[in-house]
Amino acid sequence: MATFPLPPNLGALHDDVIAYASAIQCTIAEDGGCQSLASEALNVLAYNALLTHRGIRTLCEAGWTPLTPILNRTLLDIFANCIGVLNRPELAEFMASFKYIADFYRKWLTDPEITAPERQEANAALDALVARLPTADQGAARQLIQDGHPRTYWFQPEYNTTKDLLELSPHHIHRIYKLFSSVTHGGFSARILFNDDPAAENINPRQHPRNTLRSIAASCRLLLEICYIRDRWDNFEVGEAAYNELLVRINALQTP
C-alpha cells in the first residue's frame, strides 16, 4: 500500500495514460504484431517508457519525489530515441536495426571479457538483423559490423547529441532535458528540484504534494507522446481521440 497515495484525479490520469498505451499495444498485436524492425524498436521504447512511468508513481507514493527527475529524464531519452528511429522514414529500418537494436550487440563484441559462446551469440543476432534489412541497406550494415568501433550514442553520426534529436521535436523540451540532466549527474539542483522543502535536511521519505503533481504530469505527457508516435507509425492513428482527450486533461492540471 502506498504511503502517500496520489490524489484520486491524478492517480486516475496516471492509470488512463497506461490504458492508452496498452490499447495501442493490443491493437497492434491483434493486427499481427510488429511487422518491421522500426516497429520492434518502437515496441521496446514504449515498453520501457511504460515501466518508467509506473516507477515514477511508485517513488512519489513512497515519499521519494525528489528522485523522479532522473526517471523523467529517462523518458525524455526514450522520446529522443523515437525521433532518431523515425525522423527520416526512408531510413527507419536501417536506423532501427543497426543504429538502435544492433547497438547492444556491437558494443558487446568490443568487451575484452566476452566469451566465445557469447561472441557467437552476438554475431548470430547481428547476422539475423542484417538479413531482415532491405538489400540496399545490408552493405552499410555489414560495414558497421566490420568497423568494430561503435560510437557513444547509437544515433551518431546522423545526429551528434540528444539535443540535436530533441530540437527536431515540435515540443520545446530540450530545456527540461537539461534541467533533469543536472539531477541525473548529481548536480546541486538535486537538492531543490521536485523537493517541496529543500531546507529540510531529512533523509526519511516525505510527502511532496506540489512536486508530485509536477512529476506525474511530466511523466503522463511524455508517455503519451511516446505512444502517440507509435500509434501514428504502426496503428493508423487509431488512438487519436484518446490522445487528444488525455492531452486536455494533462494541460488542465495546475502545476506550479
Image (tube, rainbow, N blue to C red):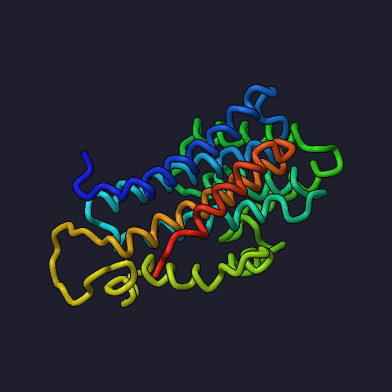
In depth, the one of 100 and 197 nearer the eye is 197
Where residue 148 sits: x, y (%)? 63, 52
Q: Is residue 74 left or right of residue 101?
A: left
In depth, the one of 187 and 132 nearer the eye is 187
* On screen, residue 136 above or below 178: above
* On screen, residue 206 above or below 146: below
Q: Quadrant of residue 125?
A: top right
Q: Is residue 251 left or right of residue 87?
A: left
* On screen, residue 29 above or below 71: above
Q: Residue at x 72, y 42 (%)?
A: 233
Which residue reaches farthest right?
Answer: 136
Q: Residue at x 30, y 46 (%)?
A: 58
Q: Residue at x 47, y 51 (%)?
A: 220
In depth, the one of 234 and 122 nearer the eye is 234
Q: Residue at x 49, y 69 (%)?
A: 176
Q: Is residue 198 left or right of residue 166?
A: left
Where residue 108 sits: x, y (%)? 52, 45
In which quadrant will I find the N terminus?
Answer: top left
Query: How many marks overall?
Result: 0
In depth, the one of 196 and 72 nearer the eye is 196
In which quadrant will I find the C terminus?
Answer: bottom left
Where residue 143 sits: x, y (%)? 75, 49
Where residue 68 sits: x, y (%)? 35, 58
Q: Quadrant of residue 209?
A: bottom left
